Image: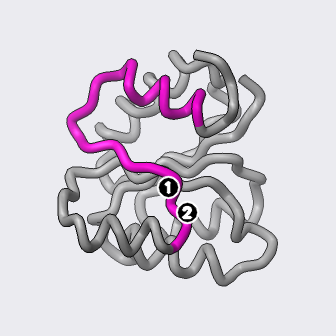
């Protein structure tokens, strides 16, 4: 699959696990980028084109909700697809994020097949 993915999570262990699943979805390792919080993610987006952001919500420095709000203000990257991958279950918060254009959400822990399917769906590829 020819797309660039940015994994944003403050846990290096979870980033590694998500990265393995993204590779299983058919995305080459050199197309997978990582950030430990929202600010680091914005920094990555300044230098690398990304098609899809897999975003945790509860992180230090800049949380996922703050990241999405800032992302949508920046014309050059405002339309990047964002999928929440988080333990967050607060419906009001998730609804606010959908209002900001978040495409979907996946609750941790998740089955690898579910994330693969979601990536294929968002990127318009048959799984």
Whichever of labels 1 and 2 marks the residue nearer the N terminus, that label is 1
Q: Looking at the image, do the residues carrying marks 1 and 2 touch, with CB atoms under 8 Å apart?
A: yes
Question: In this view, which residue lies farthest toward the right?
Answer: 76
State the residue in front, 9 or 12.
Answer: 9
Q: Residues within 10 Å of mark 2 (few under 14, many from 20)?
A: many
* Quarter of the figure with residue 123: top right
What residue is shown at x 42% (from left), y 69% (from top)? 97
Residue 127 falls left or right of residue 78: left
What residue is shown at x 55% (from left), y 20% (from top)? 25
What residue is shown at x 69% (from left), y 32% (from top)? 124
Residue 84 falls left or right of residue 74: left
Locate the N terminus and report the quarter of the image it occupies.
top right
Which numbered marker is on residue 78?
none
> Does the magenta run of residues contain 105?
yes
Callout 1 secondary element: strand
* Quarter of the figure with residue 109: top left
Q: Which residues are magenta?
A: 100-121
Residue 56 falls left or right of residue 107: right
* Quarter of the figure with residue 12: top left
Instruction: Measure the C-alpha gap from mark 1 to mark 2.
Output: 5 Å
State the residue in front, 120 or 54.
Answer: 120
Task: Please name the residue that numbered disc 2 is placed on.
Answer: 41
Q: Where's residue 65, x and y in %?
A: 40, 73
Vertical order, 121 against 59 (above or below): above
Q: Where's residue 20, x and y in %?
A: 44, 23
Which numbered marker is on residue 35?
1
What residue is shown at x 35% (from left), y 68% (from top)? 95
Callout 2 secondary element: helix
């Amino acid at each position: 699959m020819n797309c660039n993915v940015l994994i944003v999570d403050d846990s290096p262990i979870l980033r590694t696990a998500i990265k393995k699943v993204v590779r299983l979805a058919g995305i080459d390792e050199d197309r997978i980028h990582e950030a430990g919080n929202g600010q680091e993610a914005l920094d990555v987006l300044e230098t690398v084109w990304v098609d899809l952001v897999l975003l945790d919500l509860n992180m230090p420095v800049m949380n996922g909700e703050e990241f999405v709000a800032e992302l949508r203000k920046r014309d050059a990257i405002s339309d990047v697809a964002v999928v929440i991958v988080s333990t967050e279950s607060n419906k009001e918060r998730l609804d606010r994020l959908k209002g900001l254009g978040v495409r979907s959400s996946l609750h941790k822990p998740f089955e690898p097949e579910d994330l693969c399917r979601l990536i294929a769906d968002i990127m318009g590829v048959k799984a």
